[in-house]
Image (spheres, grey):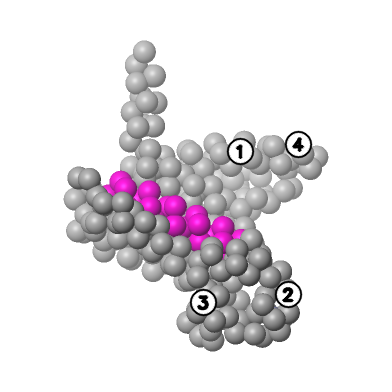
Amino acid sequence: MQLPLQFSIFAFILGTVVGSFLNVCICRLPEGKSIVSPPSACPKCGQQIRWYENIPIISFLVLRAKCRSCSLPISWRYPLVEALNGLLTLLLFLKFGVSLSFLALFIFCSSLVVITFIDLDHQIIPDEISLPGIVIGFLFAIFLPWNGWFNSLLGILLGGGSLFLVAWGYEKLTGKEGMGGGDIKLLAMMGAFLGWSSVLFIIFAASLIGSVIGITAMLVQKKDGKLAIPFGPFLAFGAILYIFYGRQIIFWYFSIGRL
Ligand SMILES: [Zn+2]
């Protein structure tokens, strides 16, 4: 189905507007503050941010990355999160069109953006997102032909269970806690949204990318494995990779095995 260009532009804008709200969640959720009130204000001078200063990406450029009244620099992370969510929404729209799959995965990917940045900042994955995410993913799955409630339920069990086993084994072997309970709940949420077959793919992809980046970081910083890198962002990356390329990568992998 060929969709008009305006639809794609609308999808991107929708993603950035939601991205603007995700920024609020990233800032406020870890501090236990409300995500609906008060309205956004400059953290230094308290100047309220007007609606026309809250236009995703554009306002950042127009204000030249500074607060209008006190010139406090605005972090480049705000437009980055907006642009990232806009891009993800556009890609989902191009793949799924106007459909229930799009809605489910739009909610899923937006949650992953919030989780990624909170995990990078605080090394936690908020239960406020992962636990409702498990339920919402399961409810969507009932109506999605490519998932289904049984597939989703297996995904929750496999996602929660397998990472729990890995974490338990790691702790038994090394006496150190390597993986948090947050990662386990996150993977259960991913299993709920994407089904059980996604879980192994996501663990494999996240471990592979995580190891490469972890080893590189250790070599650069010359530390001896004490460096704590949050695992959540790698799981999120693995899940997004699965949505867009999972089938192709799995097919490619098994076709090499047969050569
Ligand atoms: Zn200010």
Q: Which numbered disc flags the more N-terminal residue, 4 or 3?
A: 3
Label at residue 89: none
Q: Name the residue under label 1.
A: 211
Which amino acid is tagged 4? Leu
- Quadrant hosting residue 246: top left
| Labels 4 and 3 touching (C-beta < 8 A) | no
In this rendering, the label closer to the viewer, 1 or 2? 2
Label at residue 71: 2
Task: Compute the Cα span from label 1 to label 2.
Answer: 40 Å
Q: Could you tell me residue 181's position as x and y percent?
A: 53, 59
In this rendering, the label closer to the viewer, 4 or 3? 3
Q: In which quarter of the image is the N terminus?
A: top left
Q: Which numbered disc flags the more N-terminal residue, 1 or 3?
A: 3
Task: Compute the Cα span from label 4 to label 1.
Answer: 12 Å
Q: Is mark 4 on a helix, strand or loop?
A: helix
In this rendering, the label closer to the viewer, 4 or 2? 2
- Residue at (23% x, 56% y) in the render: 99
Q: Could you tell me residue 197's position as x and y percent?
A: 33, 42
